[in-house]
Amino acid sequence: MAQSAPITFNTALPVASKEYLFREQLIVAQSGRDPATTDRDRTEVTSVSVLGYGVTGKLAVFSVVPYRNIDFDLTLGNQRINRNNTGFGDATLFGRYTLYQKDGLGSNFRVAPFLGIKLPTGDDDFRDSRGITPPPARIATGSTDLFAGVVATWQKLSYQIDAQLSYRKNNEGNGFEAGNVTRFDTSLQYRLWHSDFSKGIPDYLYGVLELNAVHKGKNRLFGVTNQNTGGTQLFITPGIQYVTKRWIAETAVQIPVSQNLNGTALETDYIFRASMRFNF
């Protein structure tokens, strides 16, 4: 059965044993607040396909494949330059294990650590008429990266609270090394409506409010640290979620409320998300 869950990150609720979960998410990220004088503008549209499988009632494994389109513009002198790149990005594999669970009347609590790897499956050296695309326009990094974290979920009849802490260690690929990423996420899903219980398992409508705190280290290119990259961002994310027995439809917008970035790092305007999830 489908259950309410965070929109921008994972949950500790299990995938039922021998069952699958499929999620397709559209993400539109717009960055156009340029502290520099180059009038940079970056738009990324990504379709993320996620397939999960419940190995047991406690262990679930997931694969993630993104298809990315990046449009990066900047002004050099009197010339407006566009760099565009489209294709499959790097694939990710990870596992999540329920380490602790406590079930009560009308509530349950779970804690699940997770561990994963990002593989260099995407094209990280795409060339256009101007040569190899710069890092902001690349759909892949060419590196093998590791990440780990823990997510906790407290579920009641009328609401659910999730919290996640994670760390990603990014490595070098073809001379480029993205900064490591530490993030903390939390989500409240509150039930606003349900259909008639007398007709079987009801449908639910949830209001969602999430908070995302992300700290990125500085990037390095051929061993040289880019002082105009990385920093800390805080997003508030309102959303809506419709939950049925076997599928979920949801949408949310990540709105930056604080951006303490290094040097002239490009700031985010917003991140829009819409997705469908299916249990089978």
Image: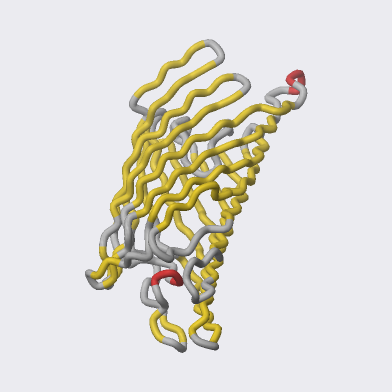
Query: Which residue of the protein is positioned furthest toward the top in this rendering?
Result: 105
Tell which of 54 and 209 is nearer to you: 209
Quadrant (top left, top right, bottom left, bottom right) of the N terminus: top right
Quarter location, residue 106: top right
Image: 166 above or below 85: above
Q: Is residue 86 visible?
A: yes
Tell which of 2 and 232 is nearer to you: 232
Q: Is residue 16 visible?
A: no
Residue 125 at what x, y percent from top left? 36, 76
Q: Is residue 52 left or right of residue 245?
A: left
* Colour mapping used in the image: secondary structure
Residue 239 at what x, y percent from top left? 63, 41
Image: 260 above or below 73: above
Residue 274 at what x, y percent from top left? 62, 50
Q: Which residue is located at x 64 percent, y 32 percent?
A: 245
Quarter location, residue 65: bottom left
Quadrant (top left, top right, bottom left, bottom right) of the C terminus: top right
Q: Which residue is located at x 48 percent, y 59 percent?
A: 66
